[in-house]
Amino acid sequence: MDYPKLRKVDIFPVTIEGRQYIAIRDPLGLMEGMLLLPQHMALLIGLMDGKHSIREIQVELMRCLGKFIMSDEIQKFVSQLDEHFLLENERSAARLLELKQWFREQRTRRAAHSGTSYPGDTNQLKALLDSFYSCPSGPGVICPDEDAKVPAGIMVPHIDLRRGGVCYAWAYYKLASALLARTQPTTFIILGIAHCQMEQPFTITSKDFETPFGTAKANAEFVEELARLCHGFDPFADELVHRFEHSIEFQVLFLQHTFDGIMPFTFVPILCGSFEHFIYGVRDIAKLEPIEEFVNALRHLIGCWHERICIISSVDLSHVGVRFGHTMAISTHTLQWLRRYDAEFLSFVEQCDADGMLQFIARNRNFTNIDATPATYVMLKVLGNAEGHILKYEQSLDPDGQSVVTFAAAAFYAAQVNLRGCKG
């Protein structure tokens, strides 16, 4: 408490009724909900790095703000953060262990974003998803097509459904048109992005997912076999991250909406952590461990699986603007430049050049915060010599116009595909 250190949490500006605030959100859920703080507290939060004592924080605030703040007032704020488990200390560590154990004992993973990011009512949710296909910019109503080639993988956004739902629909249209003409049992490997720090590069779970559409069945057998093949790390170590992560939950909604009652399916939930600390300064990207081990294990298991396999890379592209730590203004020129930059990244994706994609990110230090890299890298490596097609690209500005998120839909067709899965 003498050298307070904030945990790895989400901190971002928000505007409520014309007033500016700093919002703190805990992706792991030690603190549920959000904590709103006055904007001027941003400097104080930034000084809580474990290197500044209360006295040093007081001096730095005096230097930057030109006014004296009592140490008791600073200590009171530190205690408030500690009450919410936001500090890196024994109290939050004990709470984390408690939650990990609790989540491990749950048979299902409850819907974390129902009623907030999407309607909790089944009929309203169905109508929302239907609208993404039928709207003027959508791909149209799904019709089974016996002549359509079955994608071995798709790239889909994971941005909020109301912002990116049409882009989701373009990917699922390609997938569903082909699969619904065949209605064979299918296992979907969902590669999501973990939006919080993990100890390991990947984490899996065998829990079924609850949604307003019902309970979607995870393929526990596949998950157990995949875990058995991972010798270099424990893929369940970060399982708690699945509790609130939306990048898999949103894909499960689309799978249920598309296939429930028509085609039997299961899914494999895999969350990918950041690769950036692995790839910067590394020349031979293909030899990175334990990433290589996981890719090889997944490729091997898919190759011998008894059902059709499809891989879903649940990713967004660039995150630019004030909300993401940039000072640049989001102008028409910025958006045009960003479109060209994303197009260069997507050219590696479309060519299924996983190593080239990683080198592009490393070369540019990922300064536009593309989050697609880990999940897409794994998918492309597993598919091997596949044929990629970008279906749609979109940019979504925040309501205040100060930040933008970009995303795309794509379909991938493997060189060799049979009814048991894709051979890469």
Image (cartoon, rainbow, N blue to C red):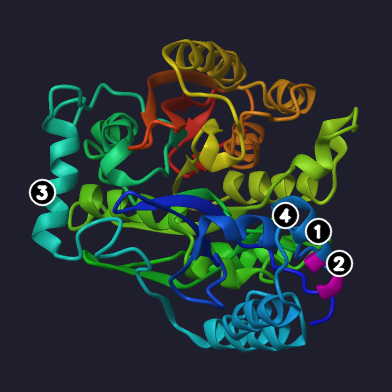
Q: Is residue 7 magenta?
A: no
Can you tell which mark lies on residue 258?
Answer: none
296 or 100: which is nearer to us? Answer: 100
- Residue 305: x percent and y percent? 54, 52
Q: Are marks 2 and 1 in contact (CB under 8 Å)?
A: yes
Q: In the rendered image of this protein, does residue 210 appear above or below residue 135?
A: below
Q: Which residue is mark 4?
A: 66
Give the alpha-carbon distance from disc 2 to disc 3, as whole Å: 56 Å
Q: Quadrant of the C terminus?
A: top right
Q: Which residue is mark 1?
A: 60
Residue 222 showing in the rendered view: yes
Q: Which residues are magenta?
A: 51-58
Q: Tell which circle, 1 or 3, labels the residue nearer the N-terminal end.
A: 1
Q: Which residue is mark 2?
A: 56
Residue 53 showing in the rendered view: no
Q: Which residue is mark 3?
A: 127
Q: In the rendered image of this protein, does residue 13 appear above or below residue 363?
A: below
> Mark 3 packing: few (<14 Cα in 10 Å), some, or many (20+)?
few
Who's the residue at 53% across and 51% down the image? 12
